[in-house]
Amino acid sequence: MAINNYTTVVEFVLQGLSGDPGLQALFLAFFLLLYILALSGNTVIIIAISLNPGLHTPMYFFLANLALLDIVCTSTVLPKLLEGLVGKSSHISYKGCMTQLFFLTWFLGAELLLLTAMAYDRYVAICRPLHYSMLMSWPICVLLAGSVWVISAASTSVHTGLMVRLNFCGPNQIRHFLCEVPTLLLLSCSLTTLNNIMIVIADVYFGVVNFLLTMISYSFIICSILRIRSTEGKKRAFSTCSAHLVVVILYYSTVIYTYLQPGSGSSLENGKVVALLYTAVSPTLNPVIYSLRNKDVKVALRKLFSCFH
């Protein structure tokens, strides 16, 4: 189909992780295992929180949202990646590519916002305990969680809308295993200035601002914990936020690593590694981190598994 003397691309070809058949088989087994573990682990976390009245608190409400985000995020990317590993190449339609871009950007942005909301929850619990029930009432929690999903959806709608107005006239080889904004912009034969401006704005808001807010919350939390006189009190206070802090460090370290990379040819390969951390490794590790670092979650999981015996 020709539009304005351009041949419109109707499908894209996603680049695989490796051309070596032996490595492809290894990657297929590894990522299939990660996908199964991510789905089962996060589903178990959601079920355990839902069925245990003792976990019906703001902290675990946000954790259930995080588990749901991990499920949908990994399901947006890994099935297509696994399909590509089964075959020699992975073709994705133009509409399919834009759909994947929309949902992936939505869920990744929502996760950054949710980590900030979870940090605020821990700040109020430890630094303002007497006002916790008022500052983190259920209407406020629902509003915070709803805002996380809606704000990120609005942002990704802008990015996807700006993307679909661009012309793609070939080549159609995406140097990645998924559809994301930066790699698609490299293939466009239209002016992408507005797209790049919106990317910078989104990066500053979702990355920099939310990271600073999270770090400010934890600065106050650490100061409050250090002022606790008893060792047991310090341990109890830190145990309520240590799992979340580990997840924040794991998630943001990949973002910081990405921004520190020079604009060389190797940055595309680094981008693949970081994307795998976001979409496969992190969703798999999050349930493990929370179940290992949180006594209440351990108890809830024991109760859940005891029902099957």
Image (cartoon, rainbow, N blue to C red):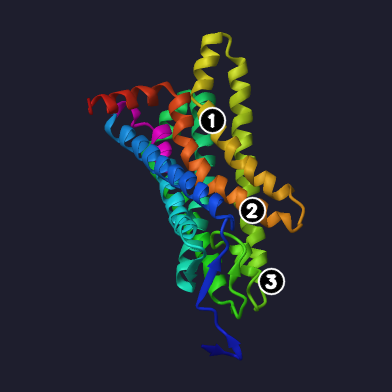
Pick whichever of labels 2 and 1 is earlier in the sequence: 1
Determine the residue positioned at 51% across, 29% down.
243
State how many labels appear: 3
In the image, what residue occupies the spot 44% across and 59% down? 83
Assess disc 2: are there few (<14), some (14-19) or many (≥20) residues with their C-alpha within 10 Å of its C-alpha. some
Read off the residue under disc 3: 193
Tell me residue 218's x, y (percent). Answer: 60, 30
Q: Is residue 113 visible?
A: no
Locate the C terminus by quadrant: top left
Check disc 2 and give the amino acid type. Answer: Gly
Q: Residues within 10 Å of mark 3 (few under 14, many from 20)?
A: few
User: Is label 1 in a helix, a strand or a loop?
Assistant: helix
| Range of residues picked out in magenta | 53-65
Looking at numbered disc 3 in the image, what kind of residue is underneath it?
A: Thr
Image position, residue 232 (x, y; %): 52, 10
Residue located 58% across and 62% down the image: 15
Residue beneath label 1, please? 123
Q: Secondary structure at mark 2?
A: helix
In 3D space, how far apart are the residues under numbered discs 3 and 2 (Cα atoms)? 22 Å
Q: Amino acid at mark 1?
A: Tyr
Prevailing secondary structure of the magenta residues:
helix
Q: In the current view of this chain or complex, which residue is farthest to the top?
A: 230
Tell me the residue that label 2 is attached to: 271
First of labels 1, 3 by sequence position: 1
Q: Position of residue 169 (x, y in %)?
A: 60, 81
Q: 217 or 197, which is in the foreground?
A: 197
Which of the marked residues, 3 or 2, is nearer the chain's N terminus? 3
